[in-house]
Image: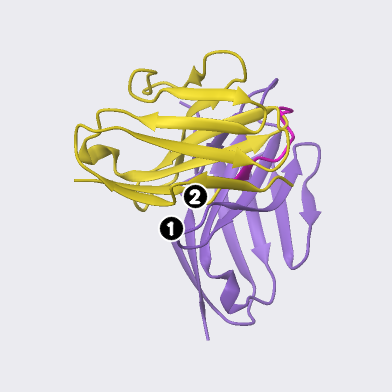
Chain colours: A purple, B yellow
Amino acid sequence: GESVGLHLPTLSVQEGDNSIINCAYSNSASDYFIWYKQESGKGPQFIIDIRSNMDKRQGQRVTVLLNKTVKHLSLQIAATQPGDSAVYFCAENISQGAQKLVFGQGTRLTINP
Amino acid sequence: SAVISQKPSRDICQRGTSLTIQCQVDSQVTMMFWYRQQPGQSLTLIATANQGSEATYESGFVIDKFPISRPNLTFSTLTVSNMSPEDSSIYLCSAGQGSPTDTQYFGPGTRLTVL
């Protein structure tokens, strides 16, 4: 069935370093992808999105890369800060005509001081 | 972006009882959704709450167990019926404008524990 998965369930990074979180998706027809950040006790917070007609999109300290050839998505966080510690989820919209998100397993990012 | 609130934020319930969770959006939205997030896991879509018609349920979720209401464009409820300990989860409401490339925004979630 359709699924979105992650290569690494946990990631520890030194404060100030860059981090990369990876995600594999299986639906080649998906045309919209989102990264969410979920802090403990809170709902997922939108970070950045990308459409399938792009391969890179940048935000403030974050960059999303999309490789449709290998169905791979990544989130790069530059100059990590303690507040970046959270679980990060990728999600793909699998419906061509409506909103229907499938979420990946999640990666727990820990920023070490 | 939409600001979404949920009530209650958490609850502890006895098995066999039912709990209704409310979701309020600060602006009119086309689509509202309900998700379940089991402890330490990812989000799974339960159903799409349709305004003025019956909710659309995903595989594995049924209306008798998770009845949903959506009386208007800013409010929805999810009821978890005849609860068992396996229903202990975080239940999340989200909202969007319906286009496949629109962002879904999430509420803070309702943490449910069933004893």
Would you say B7 lies left or right of A81 here? left
The residue pinned by badge 1 equals: A9
The residue positioned 48% from the left and 58% from the top of the image is A107
Give me the chain letter of mark 1: A
The residue lying toward the viewer, choosing from B88 and A81, is B88
**Magenta-colored segment: predominant secondary structure:** loop
- Disc 1 to disc 2, how far (Cα)? 7 Å
Q: Residue at (61%, 63%) from the top-left corner?
A: A20
Q: Is residue B51 above or below residue A78?
A: above
Q: Is residue A69 something that shows in the picture?
A: yes
Q: Amino acid at mark 2?
A: Leu
Magenta residue check for B64: no
Q: Residue at x 63, y 75 (%)?
A: A80
On the image, the x and y values in percent for residue A15 come to 59, 82
Left or right position of A57 against B69: right
Extent of the magenta region? B98-106
Q: Residue furthest bottom?
A: A113
Place residue A70 in its image quadrant. top right
Q: Residue furthest top?
A: B53
Judging by the rendered image, the residue that carries numbered circle 2 is A6
Residue at (70%, 20%) from the top-left corner?
A97
Depth order, front residue of B79/A93: B79
